[in-house]
Image: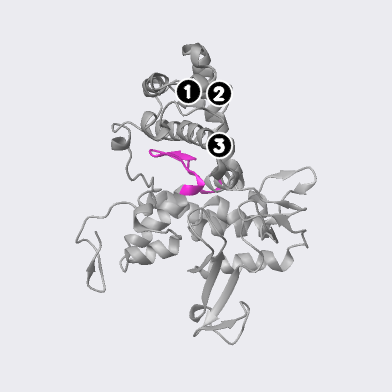
Amino acid sequence: MARHLEVDPGHRKGTCAILIKIGRWVAAEQPEAADPTAWTRQTCAALIAALDRMNVGDCAERTVGLKNRLGKPLEALSKAGQLAAVRTFFRDCQEWEWLPRRFDPQRALATPRSIPALLGPDPRVIADDIWAKLLWAGLNLTADDLPATQAGLFHPLELVRAVTLTWLFSGQRSNEIARLRVGCIRWQHDGQTIRGDAADVLAQDAVCLLDVPTHKTGTAFSKPIDPLMGEAIETWQAIRPAQPKMVDRRTGEHAGFLFAFRARRVPAAYINGTIIALLCRKAGVPTSDVRGNITSHRARSTIASQLYNAKEPMTLFELQAWLGHRSPQSMTNSTARVPAATSRRDGHRIK
């Protein structure tokens, strides 16, 4: 089907779910076009009009997990994503000559101008007081805070603490955290590599570097991170049992994943499903706020905004490099807008 979807299994799965949903809509509303070979420009126009009126859960096979969103109008981002999936399907099918070229998908299924007009920066930053409590909870985790089975803790405290501090300090996506490699932490002093436990160098004089693997928007790179995070990772790495190498689905290589235990990787969903609830419970804060649920990506937005609004802030290009973005334009959902002339660094205005 779509060639680029083979790179990302999650993207492929989501696109297939969208196509199945559109198939249900066609069968119910446009039965004469149930076969993709029968689609015309009129069918495309009908789909665009229908998506504009659809609610969450319409034409869906399962509504488990939608909770209080069920029945609400689709958001502009969902409409744009579903149209993009259908466009990709017809474009690739036509390129492979599986379907006749009866219309141009890029034109007939183009996203209406009214939808992009509703899309804009939405960093969903966590409030400072709540974020401070989550930081306190992460730095003070104990074994009593962790979920346990009859056999004891499923994951060692050192592993959970390392994952937690990586989420709180690294500004990485949950998928990138789950894909970190053994040995991803390096320490440097005056440009020279040193051991993390070196006694002859003061901790405040050493720079802790994190090696980030190939990710969503770019290639592998290194960046400085808080030494507290580096120490937590090294503590886990020191007691980490030997684990078999596993396939990195993004790169196709066999890698030694840092966060692996009992021959299983800690999944990317572990932060949303376990870590955040655990921290919120310990900190005494709800798992949602006025901006919605506290999710793994909101930490990335919060950290980016704090670095951008600090007393001595990062420049736009420094922040771009630290986050691993290819261009400043791609950071619109990671940083909150700042009033021009409120902050200065090296004589440059932060706008």
Question: What type is the residue that disc 3 sits on?
Answer: Trp
Does the magenta portion include 143? no
**Residue density around tag 3, few if under 14, some if 14–19, many if 20 or more, within 10 Å:** few
Q: Magenta region: which residues?
A: 281-297
Question: What type is the residue that disc 2 sits on?
Answer: Thr
Q: In this rendering, would 37 be left or right of 310?
A: right
Helix, strand or loop at label 2? It is loop
Helix, strand or loop at label 1? It is loop
Nearer to us: label 1 or label 3? 3
Between the residue at mark 2 and the residue at mark 3, the CA separation in whole angstroms equals 34 Å
Q: Are marks 1 and 3 in contact (CB under 8 Å)?
A: no
Question: What type is the residue that disc 1 sits on?
Answer: Leu
* Percent x, y of residue 103: 41, 27
Residue 96, which numbered label? Answer: 3
Q: In this rendering, would 22 be left or right of 157?
A: left
Please identify the quadrant where the C terminus is shown.
bottom left
Q: Are marks 1 and 2 in contact (CB under 8 Å)?
A: yes
Name the residue tied to disc 2: 63
**Residue density around tag 2, few if under 14, some if 14–19, many if 20 or more, within 10 Å:** few
Q: Residue at the location (38% across, 38% down)? A: 290
Q: Residue at the location (66% across, 61% down)? A: 258
The tag earlier along the polypeptide, 2 or 3, is 2
Between the residue at mark 1 and the residue at mark 2, the CA separation in whole angstroms equals 8 Å
* Percent x, y of residue 182: 67, 65
Q: In this rendering, would 163 be left or right of 155?
A: left
**Residue density around tag 1, few if under 14, some if 14–19, many if 20 or more, within 10 Å:** some
Tell me: residue 208, above or below residue 302.
below
Name the residue tied to disc 1: 70
Helix, strand or loop at label 3? It is loop
